[in-house]
């Protein structure tokens, strides 16, 4: 008992830092699925994929048929997804972290029945060697003059 009394500040620091390490894991809510499970969801239930990364990241590669709604614009544009309320919606960000969790929470509050977060995000998708879609290069709008 004397040890605890003599080292109360050290014990408090250990408890606070342990809580700080656990906090991110405890605050992430929502159903999560690994890349293999998301592949099954896409193939079986025709899930809708919503990518909340910025446009520039989205164009570097995204899940097939994903809809890009950057998180900064999510509140204004989530109505675009209303027709998918009864379908499975998979939310994707770069790491499967706070942006995807926040977007999934907003969709659930808006009445979406089945919202899933890609655990690990695009990083986990790439690590699993699953296909990414990249937009085709834009055709040049400048015509070269005929000789």
Image (cartoon, rainbow, N blue to C red):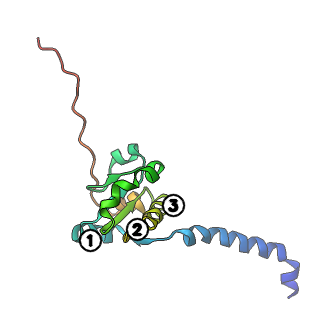
Picture residue at 28% right of the left edge, 47% below the top? 134
Q: Is residue 70 above or below residue 13?
A: above
Residue 89, given in percent of the width and then of the height, sits at: 34, 65
Callout 1: helix, strand or loop?
Answer: helix
Cα distance, mark 2 to mark 3? 20 Å
Asked if the residue at tag 3 contacts the one at tag 2, i.e. Cβ–Cβ closer than 8 Å, the answer is: no
Residue topped by disc 1? 40
Question: What residue is pinned by disc 2?
Answer: 111
Farthest residue, direction bottom? 1
Asked if labels 2 and 1 touch by Cβ distance under 8 angstroms, the answer is no
Regarding residue 133, the answer to whether it shows in the image is yes
- Kindly report the distance in space between the C-alpha atoms of the residues bearing marks 1 and 2: 24 Å
| Percent of width and height locating residue 83 | 30, 61
Q: Quadrant of residue 12?
A: bottom right
Dot 1 or dot 3, earlier in sequence: 1
Residue named by callout 3: 98
Q: Say if mark 1 contacts mark 3, CB within 8 Å.
A: no
């Amino acid at each position: 008992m004397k040890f605890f009394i003599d080292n109360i500040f050290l014990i408090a620091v250990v408890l606070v830092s342990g809580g700080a390490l656990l906090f991110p894991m405890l605050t992430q809510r929502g159903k999560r699925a690994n890349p293999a499970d998301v592949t099954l969801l896409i193939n079986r239930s025709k899930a809708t994929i919503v990518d909340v990364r910025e446009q520039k990241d989205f164009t570097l590669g995204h899940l097939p048929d994903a809809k890009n709604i950057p998180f900064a614009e999510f509140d204004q544009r989530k109505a675009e997804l209303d027709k998918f309320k009864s379908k499975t919606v998979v939310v994707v960000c770069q790491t499967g972290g706070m942006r995807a969790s926040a977007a999934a929470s907003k969709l659930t509050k808006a009445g979406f029945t089945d919202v899933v977060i890609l655990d690990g995000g695009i990083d986990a998708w790439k690590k699993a060697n699953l296909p990414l879609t990249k937009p085709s290069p834009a055709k040049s709008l400048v015509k070269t003059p005929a000789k």
